[in-house]
Each structure stands twice: as C-alpha cells, then as structure tokens.
Amino acid sequence: MKHQTNPFPPLAFRTIVELSQWRASNQGQMEIYSFLPDKGEEAISMTYAQLDERAKVVAAQLQSLNARGERVLILYPPGIDYIVAFFGCLYAGAIAVPVYPPRLNRSVTRLQHIIEDASPKIALTNSATLCTIHRRFSQEPYLVSLIWIATDTLASELSKNWHDPRITEETLAFLQYSSGSTGEPKGIMLTHKNLIHNSQHLYRTSGSSSDRRGVSWLPPYHDMGLIGGIIQPLYGGFHMALMSPFSFLQHPIRWLQTISHYRATYSGGPNFAYKLCVNKITPEEKASLDLSSWTFASCGSEPIYAETLNQFTEAFAPCGFRREALHPAYGLAEGTLCVSMNNWMAGPVVKVFQKEELAQGYTTPVPSSDSRAKALVSSGRPLEDQQVLIVNPDTLVRCPPNEQGEIWVAGPSVAQGYWNNPEASTCIFQAHLADSREGPFLRTGDLGFLQDGELFVTGRLKDLIIIRGHNYYPQDIELTAENSHPALRADCTAAFSIEIAEEECLVVVQEVDRRFQTNDLQEVCRAIRRAIVEEHELLVHTVVLIKHGTIPKTSSGKIQRAACRSQFLAHELEILAESVLTSATDIAIKGGSKNYVVPRTPTEQILAQIWAEVLGIEQVGIEDNFIALGGDSLLAVQLISRMREALQVEIPLRSFFEEGTITSIIKAIDSMEDDNDEEEFIPELVPLSRENYRASALTWENEEL
C-alpha cells in the first residue's frame, strides 16, 4: 500500500474538482481513503485515480439528467459510496446536499424539512439504503417525487460520458444543513472558494509535514467530518483512515487503536470523545496502544474543558501521547469549518479568570489558587486572512478588552448565506458595526473574548443546545415534549442545557394543564423522556413539571428560555414534580439496585453481565430500569453493540427508554424473531433513466414490503 503524502500544498487550484484531477494525474496510485467496517473486516480502500474515475461515473449520470446547478440529496451510511457520491456532485456542477439516511421506525421529519427547503430533484444512495427508503414511500409521498439513483449499480463505462462542468471558485459546492434536529432548517451555502480557503489554512495551521496520516470517525454529513475528514486529506495529499461514528461510540478503543495501527499524526473530535476514552478504555487496552505518532489532536465542536484535556493527557501519556499534541479550535458551519486554532507547534493555552465576573460578562484574571477561579481553554488564534471581532450584541459596537461579547467573523471562509432565506442571510451574514459601519461580518451567536490574540469562547447568545457535538434546536425538543402526554400545556415548555461535571446536559421544564387530573406525575415525566429519546435520540437529564401559568414568557407570549434556566438554577420554579437521572457513579457506590431480581436463564445471565460491565456497577437484576441505573443514550449505543455481538440481534434504541429492563428487552427480542419468520420482499433495482426511476418508485409504493 502507498500511504505517502505529497508535501506540495496545492494553492493554485480554484475548485475541488481541479484539485482532485491534479491528484489523480500526479498521485493516481496512492491511497487517499481507507474505510474500516464495524465488524473487523478488511478495510475498503480507494486511490486518487479510483476516486476520480468513480466520481466521473456518478457525475456523468447526473449530467444526463441536466443536474448542473440542481440540488442533489446524498443519503448513505458512512463509507466509500458516500465519498464517491459527494465528489460526483461536484464533478457534475451540481449542489450536494448531504443528509443522514433515514432508518426504519424512525421519524423522517428532518429529512422532510430539508427536502422542502432545498427542493432537490435527484437523490443519490446505494442499493441497501434505497430498499429501506422504499418502505417509506406509502407514508412519505414527497420521497416518491424524487429521482432515485443507486450509485453502486451504475456501469463504470459511464465515466467516458463525463464532460468538464466549467465551474468556478464561486460555484456552490454544497448546502451544509446543521447537525441534530432541524425543525427550522437553514442550508448554509458553501462555494469551492470557501472550501479551498479553509482547507488551505487548516493544512498550514495543523502542520504541513510530508508524513501526515489521518484517522476520522466523525460523521461525514457536516463540517468536521466532511471538510476535516474527507476534503482535508485531498487538499493535503495524505491518507485518511475512516470509520463509522457508531464504531467509535460502541467501542471508543477503536479510534485509538486505528491511530496506533496507521501511525496517524492527524485526528480529533469533540470534548466528549476525549472524555469517553478516559472513562471507557481499560488499562489492558491501553497497553496495546502506541500514540507517539499523534502530533495533531484537534478538539472542538462543543465547549472544551481544561480538566478533560488534563485527564486525557494523564491517562494516555504511558501510550506515548503528549499534551502539546492537543489543539483546541473554534468554528462553525457558517464559517465553512475552522475560525480559530492554535498552531501545530504550540500546545493548548489555559488561563484562569474570576468565575463570578465571567458570569457577569467580564474577564478578570486571577491566580489558579484563587477559590473563585475558573479555567478557560483558548480556542487558538484566528486563521490568517480572517478577522474576528468581539461585539456588544445590543449596541453593535466593539467591546472593551475586558468584556465578553458576540464573536463576529469576516474573511474568505465565511459562507455565502442561507439557501432560499434572504432575511436570515441578511441578519446573520451582513452585520455592520453601528459606529464605523465596518462590515459585513458573520454573527456567530457565540460569546467570547480575545486576550493576547487568543480566542476564548464562553457561551452562546442564541438558544441553540449543543450536546456531544450535535446541535439541537430547543423549539423542536419543546414541541416533542408537549405532545408526549395529554396533561401537558401547549406552548408552555422550555428546553435548555446546563453544565454538570463538565458536560452539557438537557433540562426540560413543562407546565401541567390544571384541567387534567392525574395522580402519577412521574409517568408524565417518563412520557416526556420516551418521546424525546424516540424523536431526537437524546436523553433528558432533568424533567421539571411546573404549575399552570408559571413558565416565564415575554409580553407577546414567547418562552423566555434564559429566564427559565436562571429560575431553575436558583430553585425559583413552582415545581409539581421533578425527575432527575441517577448517576451511574452513585449507583456503583451503592453496589446496584435495591430491588434485585436474580437472572436465571442463560440469556438473562448474559444480558445482566453485559449491562453491569457497560454501566459500571456490581450487579444488575432483570427488573432493574436502564435509566434508573444511570443509563443514557451513549451507554445504550454501547449496550446495543455488545448485545449484537453476544446474541446476534439488533435492539432498537427506544427499547432502553420504554420499560427499559432486561425482561422487556428479551420480550422485544422474541417479538423481533417472530417478525423475521415472515419472508420479506426486496424489490429489484432499476439502475438508470428518469422514467425508470419514477416508474419503479410508483411500483414499489404499492408493493407489500
């Protein structure tokens, strides 16, 4: 295998297509991507020449459908097919719209919103995913109107029909829809110029060494995974080993094992990923790791905590990891990816400030020994050619050096605005200082300050909730909560996050309708939890039910989330009932549940052992509730993986948040086995032509699948 890199930084290229073709011509036989399947099979690799050839196949099919300038959905699980489809769109001059593929028995509200906003005519996927999507046709008619192309059925000879789309640096490359929930979707318009500029500066800042090798498990559907994990290796000319996000979440050791195996120098993730490695990787697993090659460990996408960086360094120093390899960063999709990052030659910068002053918007340095001290991690220095200002969000003038304000950004990496949303584009992307009229700037909605050239991010001006690197719009969570039980009042819900043990946790405060009579408010709390897990795959740390008419609102009736959060923290809400997750640590100290029911059958014993190991407690009974044992969505993903390996079954995530006991899980397994006894019809795929796709879609709609 050829994994060498090319130290030449290709600064002269205007578009990603020019860059890709240059790589194919000059480094065609060198591998660019290797995708590692979840189950330990051999990696699937692709060279620069193969990427160019396969992208042309997809592009030629799109060109036959006059797709230049059209939005094209790409719906794939993480893998090589996804990468080929994305580059195929660029090669055709089409506008790619990366989207999480829908799953059976899961809401497709997010996908529907994106389709309504982007108005695509064509959707790219592979054969397996297309079969899953077809099951939705009878319930989701908007899916039928699309032209569906299974790219793994296209003939390689199609590449001969490809022609240069004659795109420029100003051509839109793709629409970046925010991760997580998107009840009010905004497609961020990114051009080839945006991608080239951000890639160029990320390459320089992260160290343009000739022996760079990368590893990424980040989702390829949004900025960190797509631009940092897929476009960056193409720009820098180095090999990238890719793996599924679920592979990392199920077994965090796989990330570090892959870095160790490939002798990777470049990899990263959100703060929670480093914390997960500290908590889940055993001393025995550490003994097999060699992380001495890892010189650039980026950390971003959510608040970064000094304690997490310290714990990770201490835990993996015996494996050769060095603290100076950590590189905190700040960015957002509206800025393509990266806004600031510390240079590859410098380690993380941590400074200490007075905690109460920070809460009031001021920045007062204090000694680390001060009882009022709070350590903040710098997100590095702004990239070259980019201007970062700290601005008072109310007066729209620059803040004094000792005050926090909204982070404003200007430069070639700033996106072009939101697709089909001129009002929001003007508000967010066309900001000007009130006194000097300097601008335009991107208003990030994030709060922070600059000190000695370093950017410190301190919070969010907007209500967006960020948990484990994913964005969640509070209004989506609130709508799900209020519809979960008839006892709850509409438009009387507040969702927000609080920091607990250096981790963002979700709180939902909900009014109870005085006209509804119930003696079991805890069941109402459970209904809210179940609904939010089902719809958003997100666990609520605290559910609070409050009296009718007491949630903070403006005079016009809008929920005041910040005021509700303040009342919650100050214990000022008029609470009827409250449900708080018990921490797994507390349960571990107690030794397990109080009402222990002994596992008897072999299956019960296997599951009890797996649950105890994943949850970190001494013993689990078959009637113990998963949430009561300290379970959350991340632990549920790990349990699903362990149970799949042990029992060869795939348990739905929601099963852990309904009854959530070993007994109920076994009932679910038995039910699944009964369903599998029925023979399933899988339609034959028709690979080409607009007429064939539409005809086959209508046929599948009426088939009993």
Image (spheres, rainbow, N blue to C red):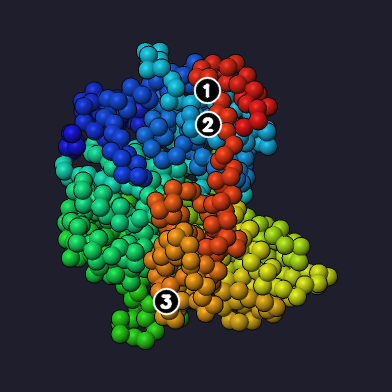
Residue assigned mark 1:
685
* Viewer-proximal residue among 77 and 554: 77
Query: Along the horizontal axis of the image, is 56 left or right of 441?
Result: left
Q: Could you tell me the amino acid type at mark 2?
A: Leu
What residue lies at 67% left-to-right and 77% top-to-bottom? 577
Query: Along the horizontal axis of the image, is 410 left or right of 437?
Result: left
What residue lies at 60% left-to-right and 21% top-to-bottom? 696
Whether residue 152 is visible: yes
Residue assigned mark 2:
130
Identify the element where label 2 is drawn: helix
Whether residue 65 is visible: no
| Quadrant where the image shows the C terminus | top right
Q: Residue furthest bottom?
A: 371
Q: Residue furthest right?
A: 515
Label 1, residues with CA under 10 Å away: few <14, some 14-19, many ≥20: some
Q: Earlier in the sequence, mark 3 or mark 1?
A: 3
In percent of width and height, residue 334 lies at: 47, 47
What residue lies at 22% left-to-right and 59% top-to-bottom? 325
Q: Could you tell me the amino acid type at mark 3?
A: Ala
Residue assigned mark 3:
588
* Viewer-proximal residue among 535 and 354: 535
In percent of width and height, residue 529 lies at: 61, 63
| Quadrant where the image shows the N terminus | top left
Q: Earlier in the sequence, mark 2 or mark 1?
A: 2
The reply to whether callout 2 and callout 1 are in contact (CB within 8 Å) is: yes
What residue lies at 42% left-to-right and 68% top-to-bottom? 612
In percent of width and height, residue 513 lies at: 78, 69
